[in-house]
Image (cartoon, rainbow, N blue to C red):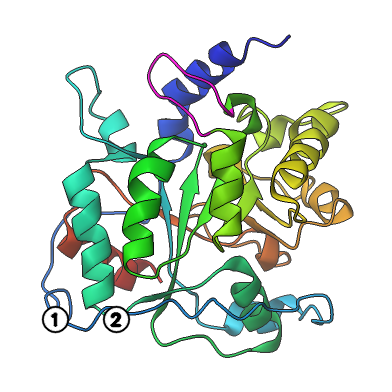
Amino acid sequence: MKKFFLSIVTASAIFAIGCQSKSQSTKDTTTDSTGSKAPIVQAETSTPIDTKNIKVADAKTILDRPQVPILCYHQVRNWKPTDGKVGKDYIVEIENFKNHIKMLVDSGYHTILPDQLYAYLNEGKPLPKKPIMLTFDDTDLDQYTIVNPLLKKYGYKAVYFIMTVSIGKKGKFVDYMSSDQIKQLSDEGNVIGSHTYDHKNFKKYEGKDWEEQLDKPTKRLEEITGKKIEYFAYPFGLWNSQGIPELKKRGFKMAFALADKRDPNEPLYTVRRIIASGYWSPKTLHNSIVKSF
């Protein structure tokens, strides 16, 4: 049996470097809409999108469309004395996370899901006003116990990118969601995506890595959710063009990176996200969304 705890601890120790978003800034600036008030919105994600008949557009068409803001979160918990300075970038404290979401609601943002983004990028299908996508990586239990109830309160939906090695495990630093909890998230209308088996750097895949890091995790997630897994997030946000054909071969419609530029030839497989830093106030988050997208 693989030593998954070693993989998890190793990933936790180094992913802060690999996941660093180059477009992020922790400097507050003024804005007109951060403090504005709006009624609670309901995410317009209830109508399923049929993506089977969508014709994939050429790269230029996709790149010419305005980007949709996509946020990437990891842990949502209060900081501990043992948390390092870099690690706190990836740990959003509970009250601050609540304020992040309230800011999005008050600013009139509507959450969308990957099928909607796919239809928009390829065929220009309409999106709700001020669309945003919320994504959560690594299977952390707090995404089920803290994040999901809060999002449901506001009618928001999200994407959860699952690292299958950790499912149902209790780690040294963090506990992880169970299969039943992942299924519940899916049943409630959220999207489950693949984040590999144990967070191995996508740029280093060769030989059996494609089976271990893509095929087996996909099969397990499909068994858990009863749905086809069509969306993928690169560990550390790192990708290479040589690996994209392997994602296509396996039926992935889109893959999500971090803040680096999209590939000019494969924008669907280098969709940009920014990490929502644990240091960011709601105002800073709002300004980062506006600047980055």
Identity, as a three-letter code, of the amino acid under mark 1? Ser
> Which disc number belongs to residue 36?
1
The answer to whether 55 appears left or right of 130 in the picture is: right
Query: Percent position (x, y) of residue 223?
Result: 77, 42
Q: CA distance from mark 1 to mark 2?
A: 9 Å
What residue is drawn where x is 73% and y is 57%?
A: 230
Element marked by disc 2: loop
Q: Is 276 on the left or on the right of 135, as rendered?
A: left
Residue at position x 64%, y 25% from top?
165
User: Magenta segment, principal secondary structure?
Assistant: loop
Residue type marked 2:
Gly
**Where is residue 246 shown, x and y percent of the image?**
84, 47
> Which mark, by number, is residue 274?
none
Q: Which residue is mark 2?
A: 108
What residue is shown at x 48% (from left), y 55% (from top)? 135
Question: In front here: 252 or 184?
Answer: 184
User: Which region is colored magenta?
Assistant: 167-177
Label pair 1/2, CB-CB below 8 angstroms: yes
Q: Which quarter shows the N terminus? A: top right
Of the two numbered discs 1 and 2 on the same chain, state the one appearing first in sequence: 1
> How busy is the neighbourhood of tag 1: few (under 14 within 10 Å), some, or many (20 plus)?
few
In depth, the one of 96 and 12 nearer the eye is: 96
Q: Secondary structure at mark 1?
A: loop
Q: Within the magenta stretch, is there residue 173? A: yes
Quarter of image, res 76: top left
Q: Nearer the viewer, residue 101 or 68?
A: 101
In the rendered image, residue 73 lying in the magenta stretch gets the answer no
Question: Local crowd at mark 2 within 10 Å, few (<14), some, or many (≥20)?
Answer: some
147 over 287 or under it: above or below: above
What residue is shown at x 57% (from left), y 90% (from top)?
126
Q: Position of residue 72 (x, y in %)?
A: 43, 52
Q: Is residue 248 above or below residue 236?
A: below
